[in-house]
Image (tube, rainbow, N blue to C red):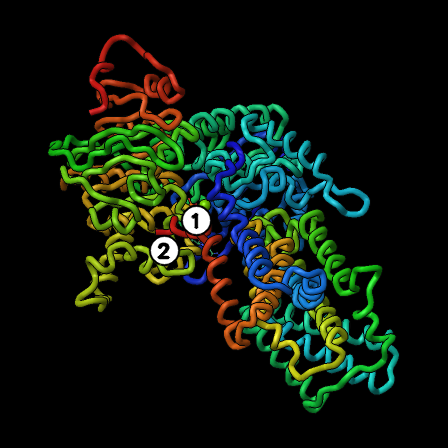
Amino acid sequence: MGGQENIVIRTEQVSKSFPGVRALKELDFEVTRGEVHALCGENGAGKSTLMKIIVREYVEDEGNIFIEGHNVEGLGIRGVQELGLSIIHQELNLIPMLTVAQNICLGREPVNWIGKIDWKSMRKMAEEFLSEVTSEIDVENFVENLSISEQQLVAIARSLVTSPRILILDEPTARLDQKSSDSFFSFIERAKQKDLTVVYISHRLEEIYRICDRVTVLRDGKKIITEQINELPQTELVKYMLGREITQQVPKESVPIGEVKLSVKDLFPKEKGANINFDLKSGEILGIVGSIGAGKSEVARAIFGADPKKKGTISVAGKEVKINTPQDAIREGLALIPEERRDQGLVGNESVRKNMTMAALKKKFCVGPSWIQKDKEIEAVETSIRTLRIATPGTEQEVQFLSGGTQQKVVVAKWLMSDSSIYIFDEPTKGIDVGGKYDIYKLIVDLARQGAGIIFISNELMEVLSLCDRVLVMFNGQIIKGLETVATNREELLFYVMGGRDYAETANNSKGYH
Amino acid sequence: MQKQPITPKGIINNYGATFAFIIAIIFFSFASQGFFSGQNLQNILVQSTSLGICAFGLTFVLITGEIDLSYGGVIGLVGAVLAGMLKDGHSIGLVTVVCLAIGLGTGLLNAILIVVLNLPSFLASVAVMFICMGAERIYNQGVTTWIRDPSVLSIVQGSVGPVPLPVLYLFALFFICWFLQTQTKAGQYVRALGENISAVKEVGIRASLLKSGVFVFAGLIFAFAGYIEILRIGGAVMYAGSHLLLSVLAACFLGTATFKAGKANFPGTLIGAFFLYTLLSGFTALGMKFYLVPFAQGLILIISVAISSARRGKIEQVQF
Ligand SMILES: Nc1ncnc2c1ncn2[C@@H]1O[C@H](COP(=O)(O)OP(=O)(O)OP(=O)(O)O)[C@@H](O)[C@H]1O
Ligand SMILES: [Mg+2]
C-alpha cells in the first residue's frame, strides 16, 4: 500500500497510565486506507484504551496521534468525528427509555425553524441508517424492549450517522447472535467495497480470519507485531497474544454422568417461552443454543427466579422446590452467571474483592452471624485472580475501571466461589480472550467432574459442540430439538437454530430430550 | 419487538398516582359538601401555582439525575428582597429584574459546586439553601414585610376573564418546560444525560455545559416561584421557602408515579402538585384536625408511590 497519504490512523510512541496500571507503553500503530485492521490481545491488554485515545475520550500522557495526517492534539470528540472517525464502544451506550430513532439520531436530531425536533424526518433518518445493518427493528420501539443483540445493531447504526470514513468497532459481535452476525458481516463487506477503513477488535479468531486484512497484537500495553493476516497462522497469533501456547481448544474429558440433579417440568417463563421440559444430570454439561429472542436467557432467568414464571415445576435432586426469587435459587444450590454483566452481575463502584465474594460471603467467609474473616476472603479472591488471570492491579480496584472482558471474568469468579451444585452459565465467554475462555472451560469441566450439573447457554456453536454432552435447541420460546453432541455437527445445529424441522430422517431424532 | 402491551397491571404501574388523584376527587366530592364547588376547585388551582412552578424547576434537575433543594432558601430570599425593595420605593420593573438575577446567581452557584467542583448535588444544594436563608434573615432582620400597592399585587391576584393570572402562569410555564424537554434537542439531551451520561458524551455533546444550564434554568424558575408566592400571599413571611420544601419534593415524586413509571416528567409533576393541594383542601373540607392532615398526606404519598414503584422494583430485582 502506498505512501503517507494512505495512512489514515497513526500513533507515535503513545503512553497512558491509570492509577496502578500502565495501560499503554510507547505504542506505534498504523492503519492504512480501505483495510480492515484487526486489533488483538488479552483482556486488559489496552485495546479499548488505545481506541479511546484515538477518538479523544482519553488524553494520552505522551506521544502523538495523527488522523488523515492531522495531529489530533487539541481536538475534541466532535473534532475527530469531523475528520471522519466513528466508534462503536465495547459497552452498549444506549439510552433505554428513548426510542431507537432517538438513540440513533442522538446529537444529530433534525429540527425545524423554532428548534422543535422534526420527528418525521428523524424517523426517516433513523430508518435509513438502521437499514444498513438490519431491517427487522422498528425505529419507534423503545430500546429497553429490544434484545441485547438488537441493541447492538442499533449502536452500530448510530455510529453511521456521522457518515464516517473510518470505523472503529470494539467487540461488536460479542453481543450478536448468529443471525445478526451474518447481517453484520454483510454490512462489513459492503462497507469495504465503499472504501471504508475499519479497525476491528474481537476475541473471536475465526471472525478475524474471515474479514480482516492485517492484524496488530497488543500485550500488556505494548505492540507485539503487525502482520498480514494470511501470513500468520492462528496458533502463532494466539502465541503472540498470550505469550504462551495453549495446546487444545477445549479441555474436554469424559466425566461420569450421575443422577438427575435438576428437573424442569412444563415451565412457562413469564417473559417468553412455553412448555420447557428437560432434565440435567450431575456431571453433565447441557448446552442451550438458539437465535435472537429464542428465549434462552428467559428460561435461565425463570429457573433462577430472576423473572416470574407463569407455571411449571422445578425439582432439585428429585425434590420439588419453590423458587420465586434468586435468593430461593441460591439456597437450593443454583447459580446463574448472567449475560449482561454491567447491569446484572456487578456493582461498578465496589472493589473486585467485594464483587467476587458477594454471593458466597455468608456461606464461606463468615463466622457467627456476620463477622467476616477478611484474610480468608482475600486469599480466595487472590486465588481466583490467579486462576482466571484477571487483569487488575489488586483486590481493591473498583470493577468499573477494569477492561470489559476482565469485568466478565469477575462475574464468573463470583459465582464459581458460591459452591453451588447447579450452574447456569449464560454466555460466560462473551468478550473474554482466548486464554481466558480456555481457563473458563477448564473450570467448568472441573465443576462437572466434582459432580455439579451445568447448563451452558451460548451463541458460539463450536464452543457448545466441544464442551457439552447434550444440547437443546430453542426456537421461538420452545425447545424444538435435543441432540447428543457426539452425534451432531455445526451444520445440523445451525439448521435447527434457524427454525428447521427435520434435518435428516436418520440418527438421533427419536431420542428426545431426556 | 412490539411496544409494551397494554395490560391492567401496566396501566396501574404507569398511571397509579393519576388514579389515586381521580379517586381522591371523587371521594371528597361525595364526602364533603363544599368540596366540588367551582370556587373551591379554583382555590386549589391558585394555591398550587407557586408549588407547581417551583416543582417544574426541580423536575428539570431530577431528569438529569441530580437533585436541587436550594429553592427552599431561594424562594424566601426572593420574597424578602421583593417586599423590601418595593417598600423602599423601587420600581416593580427593577425589582423583578433583581429577583430573577438572584435566581440566576444561585443557579450558577449550584452549577459551579455540583458540575465544576463535582460535589454531591444533595449536599451542595442544601448548603446553597442555607446560605439563602441566612441572606434572607440578614436582609429583612426577621420582620414580615407586607406589600400594599394594588397595581403590584394585581400581577398575581388579577385574572383574565374567569382564569386567575397565576393559573395562567402555571400553565404557560408548564407548556414551555414540557416543550423544551420533549420537543427540542437540548431537552432530549437532558433526559439522555440522566439516563446514561457516557452515551451523551460519546456523541460529542457537552454534558457539563448542559447540566450547568439546567441548574441555572432551575434557579430562574425557583426565583419566579418565589415571586409568585409572595405576591399571592401579599407579603414576605419569614422563610417562606421552607414551607414549600417538602411539598415540592413530594409533588415531583408523585409525578414520577404518574405517566412515566419511575421517571420525573412535567405532566406528572403538574398533577402531583394539584393532587397535594386537593388532599389538603379535601381534608380541611372534611373537618379533619389540622395536625392530622400531614399524616394523611404522608400515607397517601406512600400508597401511590408504592403502586408505581412496582414496575421499577421489578427492574431493580435484576441485580441479584
Ligand atoms: N478508566 C480507567 N481507570 C483505571 N484503569 C483503567 C481505566 N480504563 C482502563 N484501565 C485499565 O487499563 C488496562 C487496559 O484496559 P483496556 O480496557 O484497554 O483493555 P482491553 O484490551 O480493551 O481489554 P478487553 O479485551 O477486556 O476489553 C486494564 O488493566 C484496565 O484495568
Ligand atoms: Mg476492551
In terms of secondary structure, where does tag 1 sit? Answer: helix
Q: Quadrant of residue B98?
A: bottom right
2 or 1: mark nearer the eye: 1
In terms of secondary structure, where does tag 2 sit? Answer: loop
Return the residue found at the far top.
A505
**Dot 1 corresponds to which residue?**
B315
Q: Is mark 1 within 8 Å of ligand 1?
A: no
Q: Is mark 2 within 8 Å of ligand 1?
A: yes
Identify the amino acid type marked 2: Thr
Position of residue A372 in the picture relative to residue B320 (left or right):
left
Q: Is residue A440 above or below residue B128?
A: above
Identify the amino acid type marked 1: Ile
**Dot 2 corresponds to which residue?**
A392
Residue B217 seen in the figure: no
Task: Name the image quarter holding the C terminus of chain A.
Answer: top left
Residue A99 seen in the figure: yes
Circle 1 crowding by C-alpha within 10 Å: few under 14, some 14–19, many from 20: few
Give me the chain letter of mark 1: B
Relative to the observer, which residue lies in front, B49 or A47?
A: B49
Query: Residue A111 location, x and y as percent?
Result: 75, 43
Relative to the observer, which residue lies in front, B152 or A440?
A: B152
- Ligand 2's image quarter is top left
Circle 2 crowding by C-alpha within 10 Å: few under 14, some 14–19, many from 20: many
Query: Residue B91 location, x and y as percent?
Result: 88, 79
Query: Residue B313 location, x and y as percent?
Result: 42, 52
The Cα–Cα distance between marks 2 and 1, rounded to whole angstroms, is 30 Å
Task: Name the image quarter holding the N terminus of chain A.
Answer: top right
Query: Residue B107 location, x and y as percent?
Result: 68, 70
Relative to the observer, which residue lies in front, A360 or B82?
A: B82
At a point 58% along the width and 44% down the height, the residue shown is A98
